[in-house]
Amino acid sequence: MTPLLGAAVVLLAAFIKGAIGFGFPTLATPLLSLFIDVKAAVVVLILPNIVMDGIQFARRGAPLAIVRRFAILLVFGALGTVVGTRLLVALSSRTATLILGAFLLVFVTLNLTGATPRVSARGERWLSPVAGLLAGVVGGLTNVPGTPLVIYFQSLGMAKHEFVASVAFTFVVYKLIQLGAVAYYGLLPWSLVGMSVLLIAVALAGFAVGLKVQDRLEPRAFNRAVLGFLAALGLWLVIRSVHS
């Protein structure tokens, strides 16, 4: 992969993340894996993701409220991340990618037909551990923990700023755990650390433009943008897993 092409991939993915609050590793990982080993693609995107989510949360966050609300989700997500990273070492991620893509398409279809699943305050207490564990395992294996989390947060009926802050905070926690896990399993050589640091600068350029777009989006347009990206992503993941 040429440096210019790699930079373009990261720039586009970072712009989308800035605009809708997620989507960076989901888009950048499969594109980078067309040119470099998929495990290397997963690893080099962790640091840029942590930096962008840290900025996102600093702009929108209310740390104590989010920690109290999603403490259980974070604990089970941490466990799932370690398990998923172990699976990354031992298994192919094709099946997980196919299931994830199909689940996305079902979720978007339900939303468009008015049958969007909604989680009550009582249901949230019971579903948070499940959502956290699922997000962690999927994130460790495929580098896209955000997809299960975004679906879960959408089901909670969050407002735009609350949605963005919650996604950003949970992503920072999961990615820090993932960073430690890939280092522990020997997937983080210094050559990839250097590449990852360089990609941070590229990502921040696209991210800054995306944030300006996000600030101008009305809540309804923001929700449509999120659903549109999820639909495209689900279709892409299914096609990619079938033809891989």
Image (spheres, rainbow, N blue to C red):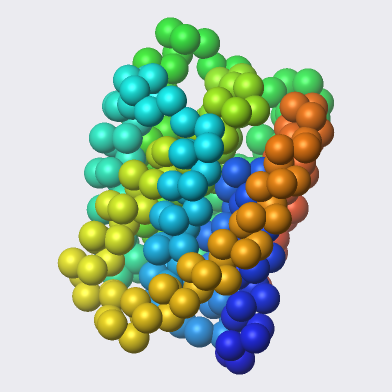
User: Could you say where residue 188 lies in the image, as x and y percent from the top left?
Assistant: 29, 75
User: Could you say where residue 37 lies in the image, as x and y percent from the top left?
Assistant: 46, 82
The quadrant the N terminus occupies is bottom right
The quadrant the C terminus occupies is bottom right
- Of residue 138 and residue 27, the one placed in the foreground of this image is 27
Q: Is residue 112 above or below residue 81?
A: above
Q: Is residue 180 left or right of residue 211?
A: left
- Of residue 167 and residue 138, the one placed in the foreground of this image is 167
Residue 161: name its quadrant.
top right
User: Could you say where residue 142 lies in the image, as x and y percent from the top left?
Assistant: 46, 60
Residue at the top extreme of this rendering? 122
Residue 4: name its quadrant.
bottom right
Q: Is residue 166 left or right of residue 110?
A: left
Kindly identify the residue that appears in the image at 61 percent across and 78 percent down. Answer: 7
- Of residue 32 and residue 2, the one placed in the foreground of this image is 2
Is residue 67 visible in the rendered image? The answer is yes
User: Could you say where residue 184 lies in the image, as x and y percent from the top left?
Assistant: 18, 67
Q: Is residue 141 left or right of residue 11?
A: left
Kindly identify the residue that appears in the image at 67 percent across and 76 percent down. Answer: 8
